[in-house]
Amino acid sequence: MKYQKTLDHVINELEKISNYNYASSIIYWDLETEAPKEGIEKASQVLGFYSGESYRILTDLEFNKNIDLLLENIDLLDPINKKIIIETKKDIENIKKIPLNEYKEYNELLSKAQSIWAEAREKNNFSLFLPYLKKIITYKQKYVNYKGYNEHPYDALLDDYEPGITVKQLDIFFDNLKNRLVPLILKINKKKNFISNDILKLDYPIEKQKEFSIFIAKYLGFDFKRGLLRESTHPFSMSLNKYDVRMTTRYFLNDLQSSLFGTIHESGHSIYEQNIGEDICNTRLGGGNSMGIHESQSRLYENLIARSMEFWIPIYPKLQETFPENLKDIPLDLFYKAINKSQSDLIRVEADELTYSLHIILRYEIEKELIEGKIIPEDLPKIWNERMEKYLGTVPDSDSNGVLQDVHWAAGLFGYFPSYALGSANASQIMNSMKNKLNVDDILKEGKLEKIKEYLKENIHKFGKLKDPNEIMEIATKEIPNSKYYVDYLIEKYSKLYEI
């Protein structure tokens, strides 16, 4: 190719960035799972160094000239390199607007903030985390101004996770959810004792929970030769590459659902990463797509698959054998109802499918107002509690179970939360399409989940970032994202469960 040397230079520089990101990810993993508190300061400095080196490459004059030259001759490139150059240019445009010292300081801040958040949550002390949160919000407000936006400042943050999505579109999406789901939720609230989940709140030995978490991850298709499962304050997944995918869960003695569905959720993310195509796995395209696509995979496994009756038919006996004291005399239909009980819970990650989106709406509205400056961080506990009561009819008994429950703000992930709701909507659309091509119910009853894994790999996973989110949805479902399937699924499922 005429510009092969130019392309080689760009790919070589991007490989350096990939190496810095790899090293940074290892440090982040360590900080989140087992690093000693006294080591945080030095780890933060190292992360700042790596982020600074990546910044220098992306803003380097020669590198930028080569990117622009390749863009001018983009039709000479194969589809993979074409996409790599286009996405790299987007990164350059975003990052070059941020001063280097601010970029490094921000990355150091995040590495400290996540550990402080964990301590604040453990101690139920919002004031510990507040100074860090204020700095993060100030940075985000500056970032919005650096990046620019057309209509709403929050659009600039949304674009980092859902390219092209806007506040205007999300307001319509969330209004539709509220208008159609809240009436059903209110009816179910009147039948709050119709379904009991008390059996899930008995004593479940932690070591046995860990044993079953490994079993369920393997059963879903997670490859432990290429991955790890550990503990953390807040469950998360991290992909270094498709050959090293790591995830965490958390365990509570009196709550079987937390580890069970936390592990299933993170397995959905991780299986996605392990299925990235070989042709792109060592490039910057070798990871999951937008967060709405990524969340569609975790929510699909967690809810549409693992909260179905069919899923448990072949493996419920295994769960009973693991916890015979609690479950040996509990029939599957009662267990199924228990794991699908709808109630206004304090904790987002443990919320049922029906009320989950209200947790997202609460966070979405608060984030918008923080970025606009309409509310201040000092007032967050009060605002959080007021809106929990407004949307879910319940008030947190502590900041740990309220405003401090999520790690996302400590990780700088403003604009991320809407992806959870978008992911749930995408998951329902994908499942609807998959059921038109596969007999999903029979596959689940027979315990042949490799067929589902293979279907998702061929229609979603293998493409990584090579395709845009709407392209992925069109490949997988033959249409662009449509929230109708999500709302229809929830109304049908919960009306039947609660006999409404």
Image (cartoon, helix red, strand yellow):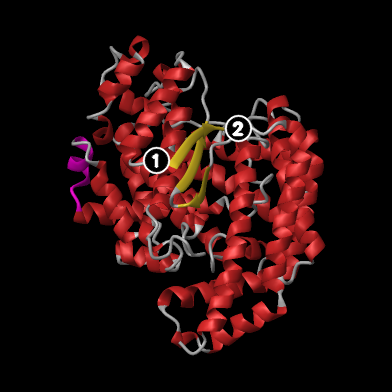
Residue 69 versus residue 214 in the image, above or below: below
Q: Position of residue 432 (x, y in %)?
A: 28, 53
Q: Residue at x 63, y 44 (%)?
A: 28
Q: Residue at x 61, y 70 (%)?
A: 13
Crowd rating for badge 2 (residues with CA inside 10 Å; few <14, some 14–19, many 20+): many
Which residue in the protein does label 1 denote? 225
Which residue in the protein does label 2 denote? 233
Image quarter of residue 372 = bottom right
- Residue 225 colored in magenta in the image: no
Amino acid type assigned to the residue bearing label 1 in the image? Lys
Q: Nearer the viewer, residue 233 or 8?
A: 8
Q: Residue at x 63, y 32 (%)?
A: 34
Q: Position of residue 386 (x, y in %)?
A: 67, 37
Amino acid type assigned to the residue bearing label 2 in the image? Thr
Dot label at residue 462: none
Image quarter of residue 92 = bottom right
